[in-house]
Amino acid sequence: MQAMQLYVSPGACCLAAQVVAMALELPVEVLSVPLRRPDSPIHAVNPLGRVPALKLADGSVLTENAAILPYLADLRPGTPLFAPAGSAERARIQSWIGYIAAEVHAASFRPISRPERYSGDPAMHAAIRLRGREQLHTAVGPHALPAVRAALAAV
């Protein structure tokens, strides 16, 4: 298997892809890139300038954890980190990945870390961050704990 390149940036929700690649001992080179800069190398890989981005050996690119995580797991059939394709368990895992991307990341972490996306008025940023923390608390409340525990036990 040829080496792949995983583009990441600190604080940008890339840790899951890094952990899966490392846990499965896949030939992945991790490259940290700056975000929100027009000269960042990520734009040559992903025109949207987003990470994670996984450059495959053939030069094609996968983006978003919802695509990258199952792809990496499928490179090691039988891994306990991900359920087999076509199983209900796999569908539940992918449902949680989607939930985390939409509700936890987009609805919570973005307002916390980038309040300027929601208001150009710096006086509003503290209230936006507070609302993001409230949404995060709701999103990862008690209903999420069994799934989180199961995921951590598998690692």
Image (cartoon, rainbow, N blue to C red):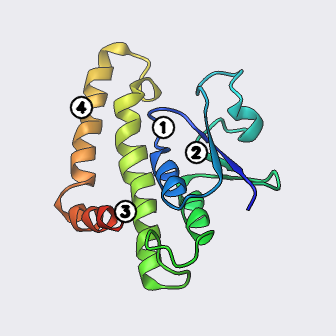
Q: Which residue is mark 2?
A: 52
Confirm or deny contact between disc 3 and disc 2 (CB under 8 A).
Answer: no
> In the rendered structure, which amino acid carries the disc numbered 4?
Leu
Q: Helix, strand, or loop for circle 1?
A: loop
State whether residue 49 is above or below residue 120. Answer: below
**SS category of the residue bearing label 4:** helix
Residue type indicated by callout 2: Pro
> Are circles 2 and 1 on residues that touch, CB within 8 Å?
yes
Q: Nearer the viewer, residue 101 or 3?
A: 3
Residue at 25%, 54% (x, y): give it: 140
Element under disc 3: loop
Q: CA distance from mark 4 to mark 1?
A: 19 Å
Give the spatial CA distance, label 3 vs label 1. 21 Å
Kindly indicate whether the residue at mark 2 contacts the one at mark 4 (C-beta within 8 angstroms). Answer: no
Q: CA distance from mark 4 to mark 3?
A: 32 Å
Q: Is residue 98 above or below residue 115?
A: below
Q: Is residue 32 left or right of residue 150?
A: right
Q: Looking at the image, is mark 3 or mark 2 earlier in the sequence?
A: 2
The label on residue 12 is 1
Q: CA distance from mark 4 to mark 2?
A: 26 Å
The foreground one among 62 and 95 is 62
Q: Which mark is residue 155?
A: 3
